[in-house]
Every structure is written in C-alpha cells, then in structure tokens.
Image (tube, rainbow, N blue to C red):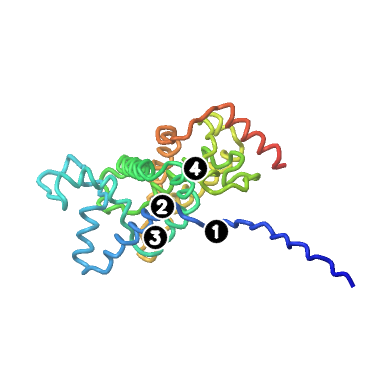
Amino acid sequence: MDSQPELPQETPPVVRREPLLTLPGPLTAYVLLLAVIHLRVLLPPEIENWTIDVFGFIPTRYDSTLLAIDFPGGAGAKVWTFVTYSLLHANLTHLGFNVLWLLPFGSALARRFGAVRFFLFMAVTAAAGALAHLVTHEHAVAPMIGASASVSGTMAAAIRFAFVMGCFLSFRRGRGDADAAARVPALSLVRALRDPRVLAFLAIWFGVNLIFGIGSIAIGTDGASVAWQAHIGGFFAGLLLFSLFDPIPRTAANAADASSSDASHSG
C-alpha cells in the first residue's frame, strides 16, 4: 500500500496583539514623578505642610497690598510655584483621579510630542491654570495643588487630532500601532471647532466643570474644592497653543479629508 507523502503544515500567521494600555516613556516618567513626590505625605505634618506652602500656588503671595509679610519660599516661590503646584496632590484620591484622566489623552500626546515637548507642554498648561486661578482668586490664602490644569490641557490638545481617522477616538481606528495612531495630521483650530464631535466634547467638558464649580463639589476626603477656573485656564492653553508644540506637519486639506471620511463611515 503506497503511502502518501506528508504535506508540510502551514504555520498560522502570528497575530500581533497590542496591549490594551501601553504607556509611552514620557508619560510613565511623569506619573512616576507624581507618585514619588506624593510620598511627602509620609513626612511629619509640619514638614509636609511646609512643602505645600513653599511649592503650592498661593494667590495671596502676589498681593501687593500686603506689606512686610514673609511667605514661605521667598521671592523664588513667586516663579516656581506656577509649575510646582501641579506636582502636588492632596491625597491618593486626588492623585488617582488626575492620573486616570491623564492616561488616554496624555498617552497620545506624549507619543506625538516626545519627551521634551511633552514636559514643556505640561509646564505651560500648569502655568496657564495658575494664572487663571490667580485672576479669579486674587486674595485667596489657601494653596492650590494638583495636576488638573495640565490634565485639562492634554485633553484639549488631544481633541485637535483624536477624532481624525485612524486616531484613538476615531470610529475607524486603523490596526497600526499606537505611535502611528497618535501621529495623524491634526485639524486646524477652525476646522476642529466645526467638527460636531469636538463641539460635543467641549460641551460635556465645560458642563462638568461648571457643575463642579457652581455646586462647589468637593474632592477626596479633605473637603478641598475643585479649582475649576484653573482647569479652564489649562484647557484653553492646551487648545490654543497645541500648534506651537506639535511636531507633525499638518496639511489642512489632508486632515480635513481624513476627518470627513471618518465621519461619513460613522453613520
């Protein structure tokens, strides 16, 4: 009985599955920095309070009507606290909430900007949030802390490209890697503000912040109120200054075509 030669078995193609959540290096470093700094809560109370006074943003520090009052940190604190306040958090709930919102939007932005641009962007949006808080709380004594203004800035910047076909909020995200998805051409600000999905995102974001602000909803267990004006300052900075940081060449026609093509397939 003749035997049939065995045919070689075909090896099934290896399907490369990307992890559900992969953090780029700059964002990982930023989150680790926040976590390490938060270990200050383990310090004795007087030292922990001193760090907040020196590195938190205190509007009264800039009140020119107050004479002969020495604030912790001296004149230098008038400069560095515009950024350093964003690295401090009241408690784990406060820190966790900011990190949770930062993961999706910050990941896309860190992949797109790279480390230097990403860290500079976080600093600029933090400063914008502090400025908005200063203007609206000129005589406030309570320190403001938290990365919420910078997180809001990343959300605003991300919507400039997040809805473009192939990116992470697109209905037709491609099967490429996360780096490619984060580097699609961005929409111009004018075209972004004409996109109904961007407008819906803006309406929801501002609505939530107004509810928190007008209702004076507290966060965490310490009863600290939400500095919603700082959120708005960071958000506007991220939305308007995005193009200054974006390294991806943008052709308005290509970005617009990609967005409209995506919208036509989403119905």
Q: Amino acid at mark 3?
A: His
Dot 1 or dot 3: first in sequence order is 1
Residue at the spot x=39%, y=41% of the render? 233
Mark 3 sits on what residue?
Answer: 94
Give SS at disc 3.
Answer: helix
Q: Which mark is residue 76?
A: none
Rendered image: mark on residue 19: 1
Return the residue found at the far left: 68
Secondary structure at badge 4 equals helix
| Earlier-in-chain disc, 2 versus 4 | 2
Residue occupied by mark 2: 25
Residue type, numbered disc 2: Gly
Within 10 Å of the Cα at label 3, are there few (<14), some (14-19), or many (20+) other Cα atoms? many
95 vs 169, left or right, is left
Residue pointed to by mark 4 = 158
Dot 1: element? loop
Inspect the image, locate mark 4, and give the three-letter code of the amino acid beneath it.
Answer: Ala
Distance between the alpha carbons at the discs numbered 2 and 1: 15 Å
Q: Give the answer, above or below, for where 249 lies relative to 136.
A: above
Which amino acid lies under the numbered mark 1 shown in the image of this protein?
Pro
